[in-house]
Structure formats: structure tokens, C-alpha cells
Image (tube, rainbow, N blue to C red):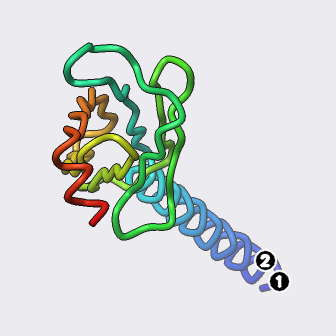
Amino acid sequence: MIKRALYSTLLLTLIVGISYINSYAQSNEANAQTKAATLSGTVVDASTGNPISEIEVQLKGTEESATTDSTGHFEFMNMENGTHTVYINADGYKEYTQDVDLSQGDAQVTIKLEAVSNDEEDSNNK
């Protein structure tokens, strides 16, 4: 009788343990799928094609931002899959907004900023 109770307890412990491991693995897999994407890119001047450094690239609706390096490169890692809106408002350039789809994983973009003309700068400063 004690042997049977011991086997039943061991079997129950084994089943519970396997269930826990399986649910933990599924949870980690789902978490990895929702935060697995990287959004990277380069910011360049639209007229010259030259990279622009020290530009703040923001993700609308979040607190996240990245600053371009000397080659115009920026990167956001561990992003949730889905659509994100990139926003730039830099002195001397027109505002820029672009939706980027990360539903299939990583994305790389080239952002071409258009310089503000002197007439536009004058009207903005009034």
C-alpha cells in the first residue's frame, strides 16, 4: 500500500513538473516572439546623400529615442513586433514621420531628411 502511494506521488510530481516546464517554455517563446525585432537605419541628407550625425530619432508613443552616430546610423533593439512610427524633428530639416512594420522581424530603413529652405525657416521663426 505504501509502495502504491509512493508511486502515485512520484507520478503526480512528474506530471506537474512536465506541465510546469512546458508552460514555462511556451511563455518564454511567446515573450521572445513579441520582443525580438531590431529597427535600425541610417539618416542622410536628401539632397547630398551624406550621413547626418547627432540626429535624435524618436519612436512616437514611447519614451524611446536613439541618436545617430558619425555614420548616421541608429538602432532600437528588443522591439515588440508590429508597426512603429519613427519621428524626427531636427533643426535645419523638415519634420519626418515614417511607419515601420516589424511584424516579420527586423527592419532596416534609410531616412532622407529634406533641408528647410530659407523662406520656410523665416516663416517658422515669425
Name the residue rendered at 37%, 26% in the picture: 42
Q: For the C terminus, give its image quadrant.
A: bottom left
Q: Nearer the viewer, residue 17 or 31?
A: 31
Q: Nearer the viewer, residue 107 or 126?
A: 126
Asked if residue 24 lies left or right of residue 99, the reply is right
Identify which amino acid the numbered label 2 is placed on: Leu
Instruction: Calculate the distance from the C-alpha at mark 1 to the C-alpha at mark 2.
Output: 6 Å
Residue 82's spot in the image, x, y percent?
25, 55
- Which residue, given by chain and number where applicable, does mark 1 sit on? 2
Name the residue rendered at 42%, 38% in the picture: 38
Residue 7's spot in the image, x, y percent?
72, 72
Identify which amino acid the numbered label 1 is placed on: Ile
Q: Mark 2: which secondary structure?
A: helix
- Which residue, given by chain and number where applicable, does mark 2 sit on? 6
Asked if residue 59 lies left or right of residue 95, the reply is right
On the image, which quarter does residue 124 sit in? bottom left
Give the residue furthest to the right.
Answer: 2
Q: Is residue 67 above or below residue 47?
A: below
Mark sitting on residue 87: none
